Image (cartoon, rainbow, N blue to C red):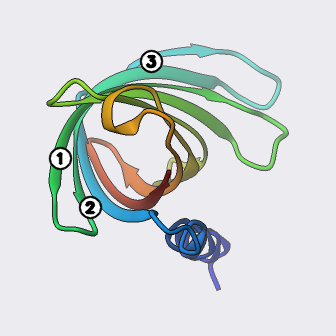
C-alpha cells in the first residue's frame, strides 16, 4: 500500500471524526484554486530548499449545505529532517470579512500531489473562539480537502 495514501486516509478519517463527539461540531469539504507561487530557494547539503507564498480562493461547503467563499494567503517552508517535509500557515477571510488561520504540515514531492493536515483557529466573526482540523490534497493550482470546526 502506498504510505502517502494510507497517511492521507488516516488524516481524513481523523479530520471528520475528531470533533464528532462535540455537540456543535460541523464538518465541511472544500476546493481551492490559487495563483502561481512566489518562490525562493537556498542551497543545502541534501539539495535545494524551497519556500514560497501564494494567494487564492477557497470554496467551502458546510455539512448544513451552506457554501462559503474565502480569500486566502499562504506561506510554506521546508522542514528537513522532520516527519513531514514542509510546514504551512495560511490566513483566510470569507466574503463577510470573518477570519481564520490554518497551521499545517505537508508531505510533498515533485512526483505527485501534496498531502497536508492541520489545525484551524478562528480569529473573528462566526469563527471567533472556534478550533478545528483539516486535511487536503493538491498540487499546482488547485486541490480539495475536508475538515471539521468545533465550538
Please tell me whether residue 31 is drawn above or below residue 124 in the rendered image: below
**Residue 93 image point, x, y percent:** 28, 27
| Residue plotted at (77% across, 20% down) | 44
The reply to whether dot 3 and dot 1 touch (C-beta < 8 Å) is no
Query: Along the horizontal axis of the image, is 81 left or right of 125?
Result: right
View extreme (bottom): residue:
1
**Residue 151 image point, x, y percent:** 50, 51
Front residue of 20 and 118:
20
Front residue of 61 and 75:
61
- Which residue has dot 1 on it? 68
Q: Nearer the viewer, mark 2 or mark 3?
A: 2
- Which residue has dot 2 on it? 62
Please tell me whether residue 27 is drawn above or below residue 126 in the rendered image: below
Query: Callout 3: helix, strand or loop?
Result: strand
Q: Alpha-carbon neighbours of circle 3 within 10 Å: few (<14), some, or many (≥20)?
A: few
The numbered dot on residue 39 is 3
CA distance separating discs 2 and 1 = 8 Å
CA distance separating discs 2 and 3 = 32 Å
Front residue of 121 and 49:
121
Mark 2 or mark 1, which has the lower sequence index?
2
The reply to whether dot 2 and dot 1 touch (C-beta < 8 Å) is yes
| Residue plotted at (58% across, 74% down) | 21
Q: Residue 43 appears in which quarter of the rendering?
A: top right
Q: Alpha-carbon neighbours of circle 2 within 10 Å: few (<14), some, or many (≥20)?
A: some
Query: Callout 2: helix, strand or loop?
Result: strand
**Residue 1 image point, x, y percent:** 65, 86
| Residue plotted at (42% across, 20% down) | 53
Q: Residue 69 appears in which quarter of the rendering?
A: top left
The reply to whether dot 2 and dot 3 touch (C-beta < 8 Å) is no
Query: Along the horizontal axis of the image, is 116 left or right of 37?
Result: right
Amino acid at each position: 500500500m502506498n504510505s502517502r495514501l494510507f497517511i492521507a486516509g488516516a488524516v481524513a478519517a481523523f479530520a471528520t471524526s475528531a470533533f464528532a463527539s462535540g455537540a456543535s461540531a460541523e464538518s465541511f469539504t472544500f476546493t481551492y484554486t490559487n495563483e502561481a507561487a512566489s518562490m525562493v530557494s537556498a542551497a543545502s547539503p541534501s539539495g535545494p530548499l524551497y519556500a514560497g507564498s501564494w494567494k487564492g480562493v477557497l470554496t467551502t461547503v458546510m455539512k448544513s449545505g451552506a457554501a462559503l467563499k474565502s480569500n486566502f494567503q499562504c506561506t510554506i517552508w521546508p522542514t528537513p529532517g522532520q516527519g513531514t517535509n514542509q510546514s504551512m500557515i495560511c490566513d483566510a477571510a470569507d466574503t463577510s470579512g470573518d477570519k481564520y488561520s490554518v497551521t499545517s504540515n505537508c508531505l510533498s514531492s515533485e512526483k505527485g500531489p501534496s498531502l497536508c493536515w492541520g489545525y484551524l483557529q478562528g480569529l473573528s466573526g462566526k469563527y471567533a473562539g472556534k478550533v478545528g482540523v483539516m486535511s487536503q490534497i493538491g498540487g499546482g493550482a488547485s486541490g480539495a480537502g475536508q475538515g471539521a470546526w468545533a465550538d
